Amino acid sequence: MISAGGSSQKKYLLVKLSMQHGTLNKRLPLLQEAALNGKVVLLRFDHNVVKKGVIKDSARIDKTLGTLYHIVDRGGRPILMSHIGRPRDKKTGKITCSPNESVAPVVDYLQRKLHVELHIPECEIDPDFGIAGLGNSVYRAVGDLKDRKIGGIYLPNTRWFRGEEGEGFFRDNFAVLLSDLADVFVNDAFGSWQPHVSTYDVTKFLPSYAGFLMQQEIEHLDSVIHVEGPFLAVIAGSKYDTKIGPLTALYDRADSLILGGVLYNAYLCAKYGVSINGISEDDIIAAKGLADKDRTHGKILEMPYVIESDILEEKAEGKHRTRSLADFKPGDKLGYVLDIDPRSFEDQKVSEAVLSAKTIFVNAVMGLTPHFPDGSRALFEALSRNLTATKMFGGGDTLQEFKNLCPGLYLSALDNERYYFFTGGGTVLTAIEQGSPYGLKPVQALMESKERLGKKA
């Protein structure tokens, strides 16, 4: 079985103690309240860190070890599950079960980390629709788990199962099959906010609890939603329409806002009457409301220097240049605006807002990676000069660029209590848009499970 010890054990105890004194909604069922001794525990994690069969960053896995240690320490016998990638074609419904989206690399990592055997049961795969149900291999593995012949089970990629994102019979059947494997369900997959079978439906059949990472993420989300000001938000994106809701919510809460990517380019087009290559008329129309609103409230910190490029494919000599917003004239036609010039962060207004902020939330890569990294590097370095603010980062791309561009700063931030790294950027933005983490469907399902258990008691 998995043994709990060493520095990781200390970290999990610290998280556990902090959860006992937090501000979590009293309706949320907490892992530390669950009776686990001798129970088979179905665990939903968000270990979606595999790209082309390789783990790019294990941090999201490591953050769930506290929950796993606690369950084993209390006598529970774990069955783990997670999704990897997006193997289902939304138009055709076809599911491709590629080795590149297997949980095997995660299992290999956990076995090396924990010195334990985790079994991946084999399931029959349909070449068009993935896995229809659980085979005999799963049930034999559960028997071995109960007899302590193996340390744990890791089910195949949940999105390989036809019912996970489906509807009707296969969805209902998958929920029942999963719940029949275990006595207790624990959701520690904060980054998986969609109401799929393994995050939502299974709670209807099993006593269900929030793991330690889920609790920690929710508490920090409250810090973004009920924020200590001055509050600086930094947000970027490759599509304007997908960010309108969170962007509006952040604008209303923030004292200052920095934009990047298509969001900033569309805003510049709307405000200055210029056209930027690659920015659609729909994006510009959508940004007009923000530009008009900001004329009254003045929250957007404009980056005064941007990098214009003639091509997207590379940062070629003679093909890119710095442009100043002061030179923009209505009707100007720009090439691709692919980055923020680092000098923008030396602007007095920008620098003062960064240094005076008490809370900073970042979900942004400022330039088009990998050829235009300078704006993002300048952003991370500028934020680091504020030594007193609480800094929270959300989004896989944001964290990956932070780690790649400023590795020393990233490593020091991991042990700095003033930094917090969310494991799910989409979940954070959805909760900000809704105004509460408790409106997320999987979180609601946990609370409804607690209510049902209370009525039975």
Image: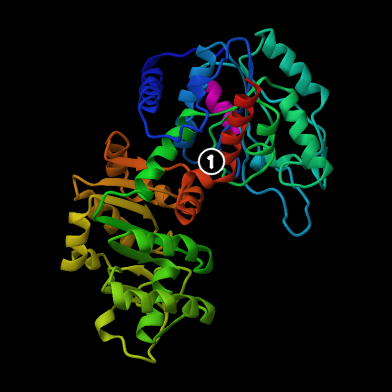
Task: Tell me: residue 263, above or below residue 272.
Answer: above
Would you call the spot at circle 1 few (<14 residues within 10 Å), some (14-19), or many (20 or more)? many
User: Which is nearer the eye, 272 or 176?
Assistant: 176
Residue 435 rendering spot, x and y as whole percentages: 45, 52
Magenta highlight: main SS: helix
Looking at the rendering, in which quadrant would you find the N terminus?
top right
- Residue at position x 74%, y 13% in the image: 143
Task: Tell me: residue 206, above or below residue 276.
Answer: above
Residue type at the position of mark 1: Val
Regarding residue 230, the answer to whether it shows in the image is yes
Residue 375 rendering spot, x and y as whole percentages: 32, 62
Residue 59 rendering spot, x and y as whole percentages: 44, 35
Q: Give the range drawn in magenta.
A: 105-113
Magenta span contains residue 109? yes
- Residue at position x 71%, y 46% in the image: 165
Looking at the rendering, in which quadrant would you find the C terminus?
top right
Q: Mark 1 points at which residue?
A: 49
Regarding residue 347, the answer to whether it shows in the image is no
Magenta span contains residue 308? no
Task: Tell me: residue 290, above or below residue 200.
Answer: below
Secondary structure at numbered mark 1: loop
User: Which is nearer the eye, 151 or 225?
Assistant: 225
Could you tell whether 251 is left or right of 178 in the image?
left
Task: Tell me: residue 383, above or below residue 338.
Answer: above
Residue 4 rendering spot, x and y as whole percentages: 46, 14
- Residue at position x 36%, y 75% in the image: 293
